[in-house]
Image (cartoon, grey):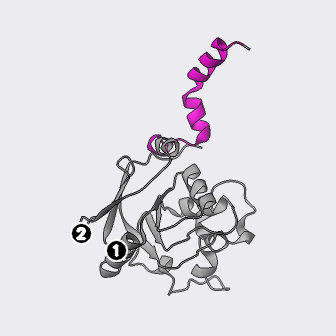
Amino acid sequence: MAYDKFDILTSSAVPLPIENVDTDQIIPARFLKATERKGFGENLFRDWRYNNDGSPKSDFVLNNPIYSGQILVGEKNFGSGSSREHAAWAVYDYGFRCVISSFFADIFKGNCLNVGVLPVQVSSAFSDKIFAAIDEDPKTELTVNLNDQTVTIVSSGEQETFDINEYKKNNLLNGFDDIDYLLNIKKEVQDFAQNTPL
């Protein structure tokens, strides 16, 4: 399944200043029955967002109308716990295209890259600056430039670079998942097969 190309994203951000957010908090296990990547966004952070009767918890950030945008800013060790792909699906389906944290669990980070969500790992100091900027102005914007591998706080111009696997970077820039990538080089694969002796 192809995804929208990711190049430069400028957006306000939703802050989640909680450390060690694990995948069971991102998408509780009882919602893992579906195999399609649709419909998970409504249950993103389900137990933090809603009371047992289904009413929204007013003190949770996703229920606060002053915060919006396509960027989720989390604290360190974001996405720890089980390896469920559904956590990344829920983040994408909710509408986030980028998650920023000072540290990601490796499997969650890989799952995000596979479904069109860019995980941007920044230093703890820069993470603190992002949270402070959002706290000062909830509408503050961040610019994430995948090609240059930079994230910028627009209001101050402060910027930091981030690392990303080159293959995954190219896939995001082109809107490819792994299958799309192989289909895109189908002719090269066929030529190689025809010209390589058994």
- Of 130 and 179, the residue lying toward us: 130
Q: What element carries label 1?
A: helix
Residue shown at the point (36%, 63%) measured from the top left: 11
Checking the image for residue 129, the label placed there is 1
**Which residue corresponds to mark 2?**
156
Q: In which quarter of the image is the N terminus?
A: top right
**Label 2 with label 1: CB-CB less than 8 Å:** yes
Mark 1 surroundings within 10 Å by alpha-carbon count, few (fewer than 14), some (14 through 19), many (20 or more): some
Q: In this view, does 7 lie above or below 12?
A: above
Looking at the picture, which amino acid does disc 1 mark? Answer: Lys
In percent of width and height, residue 15 lies at 44, 75
Magenta-colored segment: predominant secondary structure:
helix
In percent of width and height, residue 134 lies at 35, 76
Is 40 contained in the magenta span? no
Q: Is residue 23 above or below residue 165?
A: below
- Of 34 and 153, the residue lying toward us: 153
Q: Which residues are the magenta region?
A: 172-197
Image-based side of 61 in relation to 50, left or right: left
Looking at the picture, which amino acid does disc 2 mark? Answer: Ser
Q: In this view, does 121 lie above or below 43?
A: above
Checking the image for residue 77, the label placed there is none
Q: Earlier in the sequence, mark 2 or mark 1?
A: 1
In percent of width and height, residue 71 lies at 43, 64
Residue shown at the point (66%, 14%) measured from the top left: 196
Q: Is mark 2 on a helix, strand or loop?
A: loop
